[in-house]
Amino acid sequence: MNGAYDLKALSELALSLKRDHPDEDNASVLLEPNIAYDDLIQVMDAIRSTETAEGASPTPTRVALYTNIAVGDAP
């Protein structure tokens, strides 16, 4: 998206994966050398939790996704 990461799509994907694997809390983020630190933090935030308006209440609620995030260098 215009040079920016689609963090909303990433959160939606993480939410879909969490629905398929509700007991999983671990995620790994592999970082390439040219990725900005702020981008890393935004990606970690996108997979850590998201807001959803599921259920009877139309008010969005925060849902924990992958709270144990390991960061490493991409191969």
Image (tube, rainbow, N blue to C red):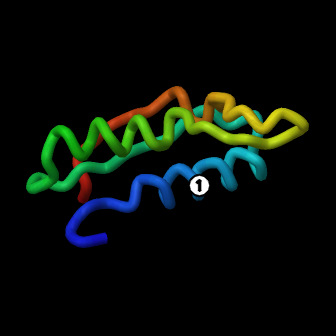
Which of 41 and 33 lies nearest the eye of the viewer? 41
Q: Is residue 12 above or below residue 37?
A: below
Across and down, in percent, residue 20 comes to: 77, 52
Q: Is residue 71 left or right of residue 9?
A: left
Which of 46 and 24 lies nearest the eye of the viewer? 46
Considering every residue shown, the one lying at the far bottom of the view is 2
Q: Residue, x 67% and y 34% (percent of image)?
A: 60
Name the residue carrying label 1.
Answer: 12
Which of 51 and 22 lies nearest the eye of the viewer? 51
Considering every residue shown, the one lying at the far front of the view is 58
Q: How many tags in the picture?
A: 1
Q: Residue, x 18% and y 55% (percent of image)?
A: 32
Q: Is residue 48 left or right of residue 70?
A: right
Task: Residue type at mark 1: give it.
Answer: Glu
Q: Is residue 49 left or right of residue 29?
A: right
Q: Quadrant of the C terminus?
A: bottom left
Across and down, in percent, residue 16 comes to: 69, 55
Q: Is residue 70 above or below residue 7?
A: above
Q: Residue, x 31% and y 70% (percent of image)?
A: 1
Across and down, in percent, residue 48 comes to: 50, 34
Considering every residue shown, the one lying at the far left of the view is 34
Q: Residue, x 45% and y 42% (percent of image)?
A: 46
Asked where in the image residue 71 lies, by quadrant, the reply is top left
Mark 1 neighbour class, 10 Å CA radius: few under 14, some 14 to 19, many 20 or more? some
Across and down, in percent, residue 36 comes to: 13, 47
Tag 1 secondary structure: helix
Q: Is residue 50 above or below residue 16?
A: above
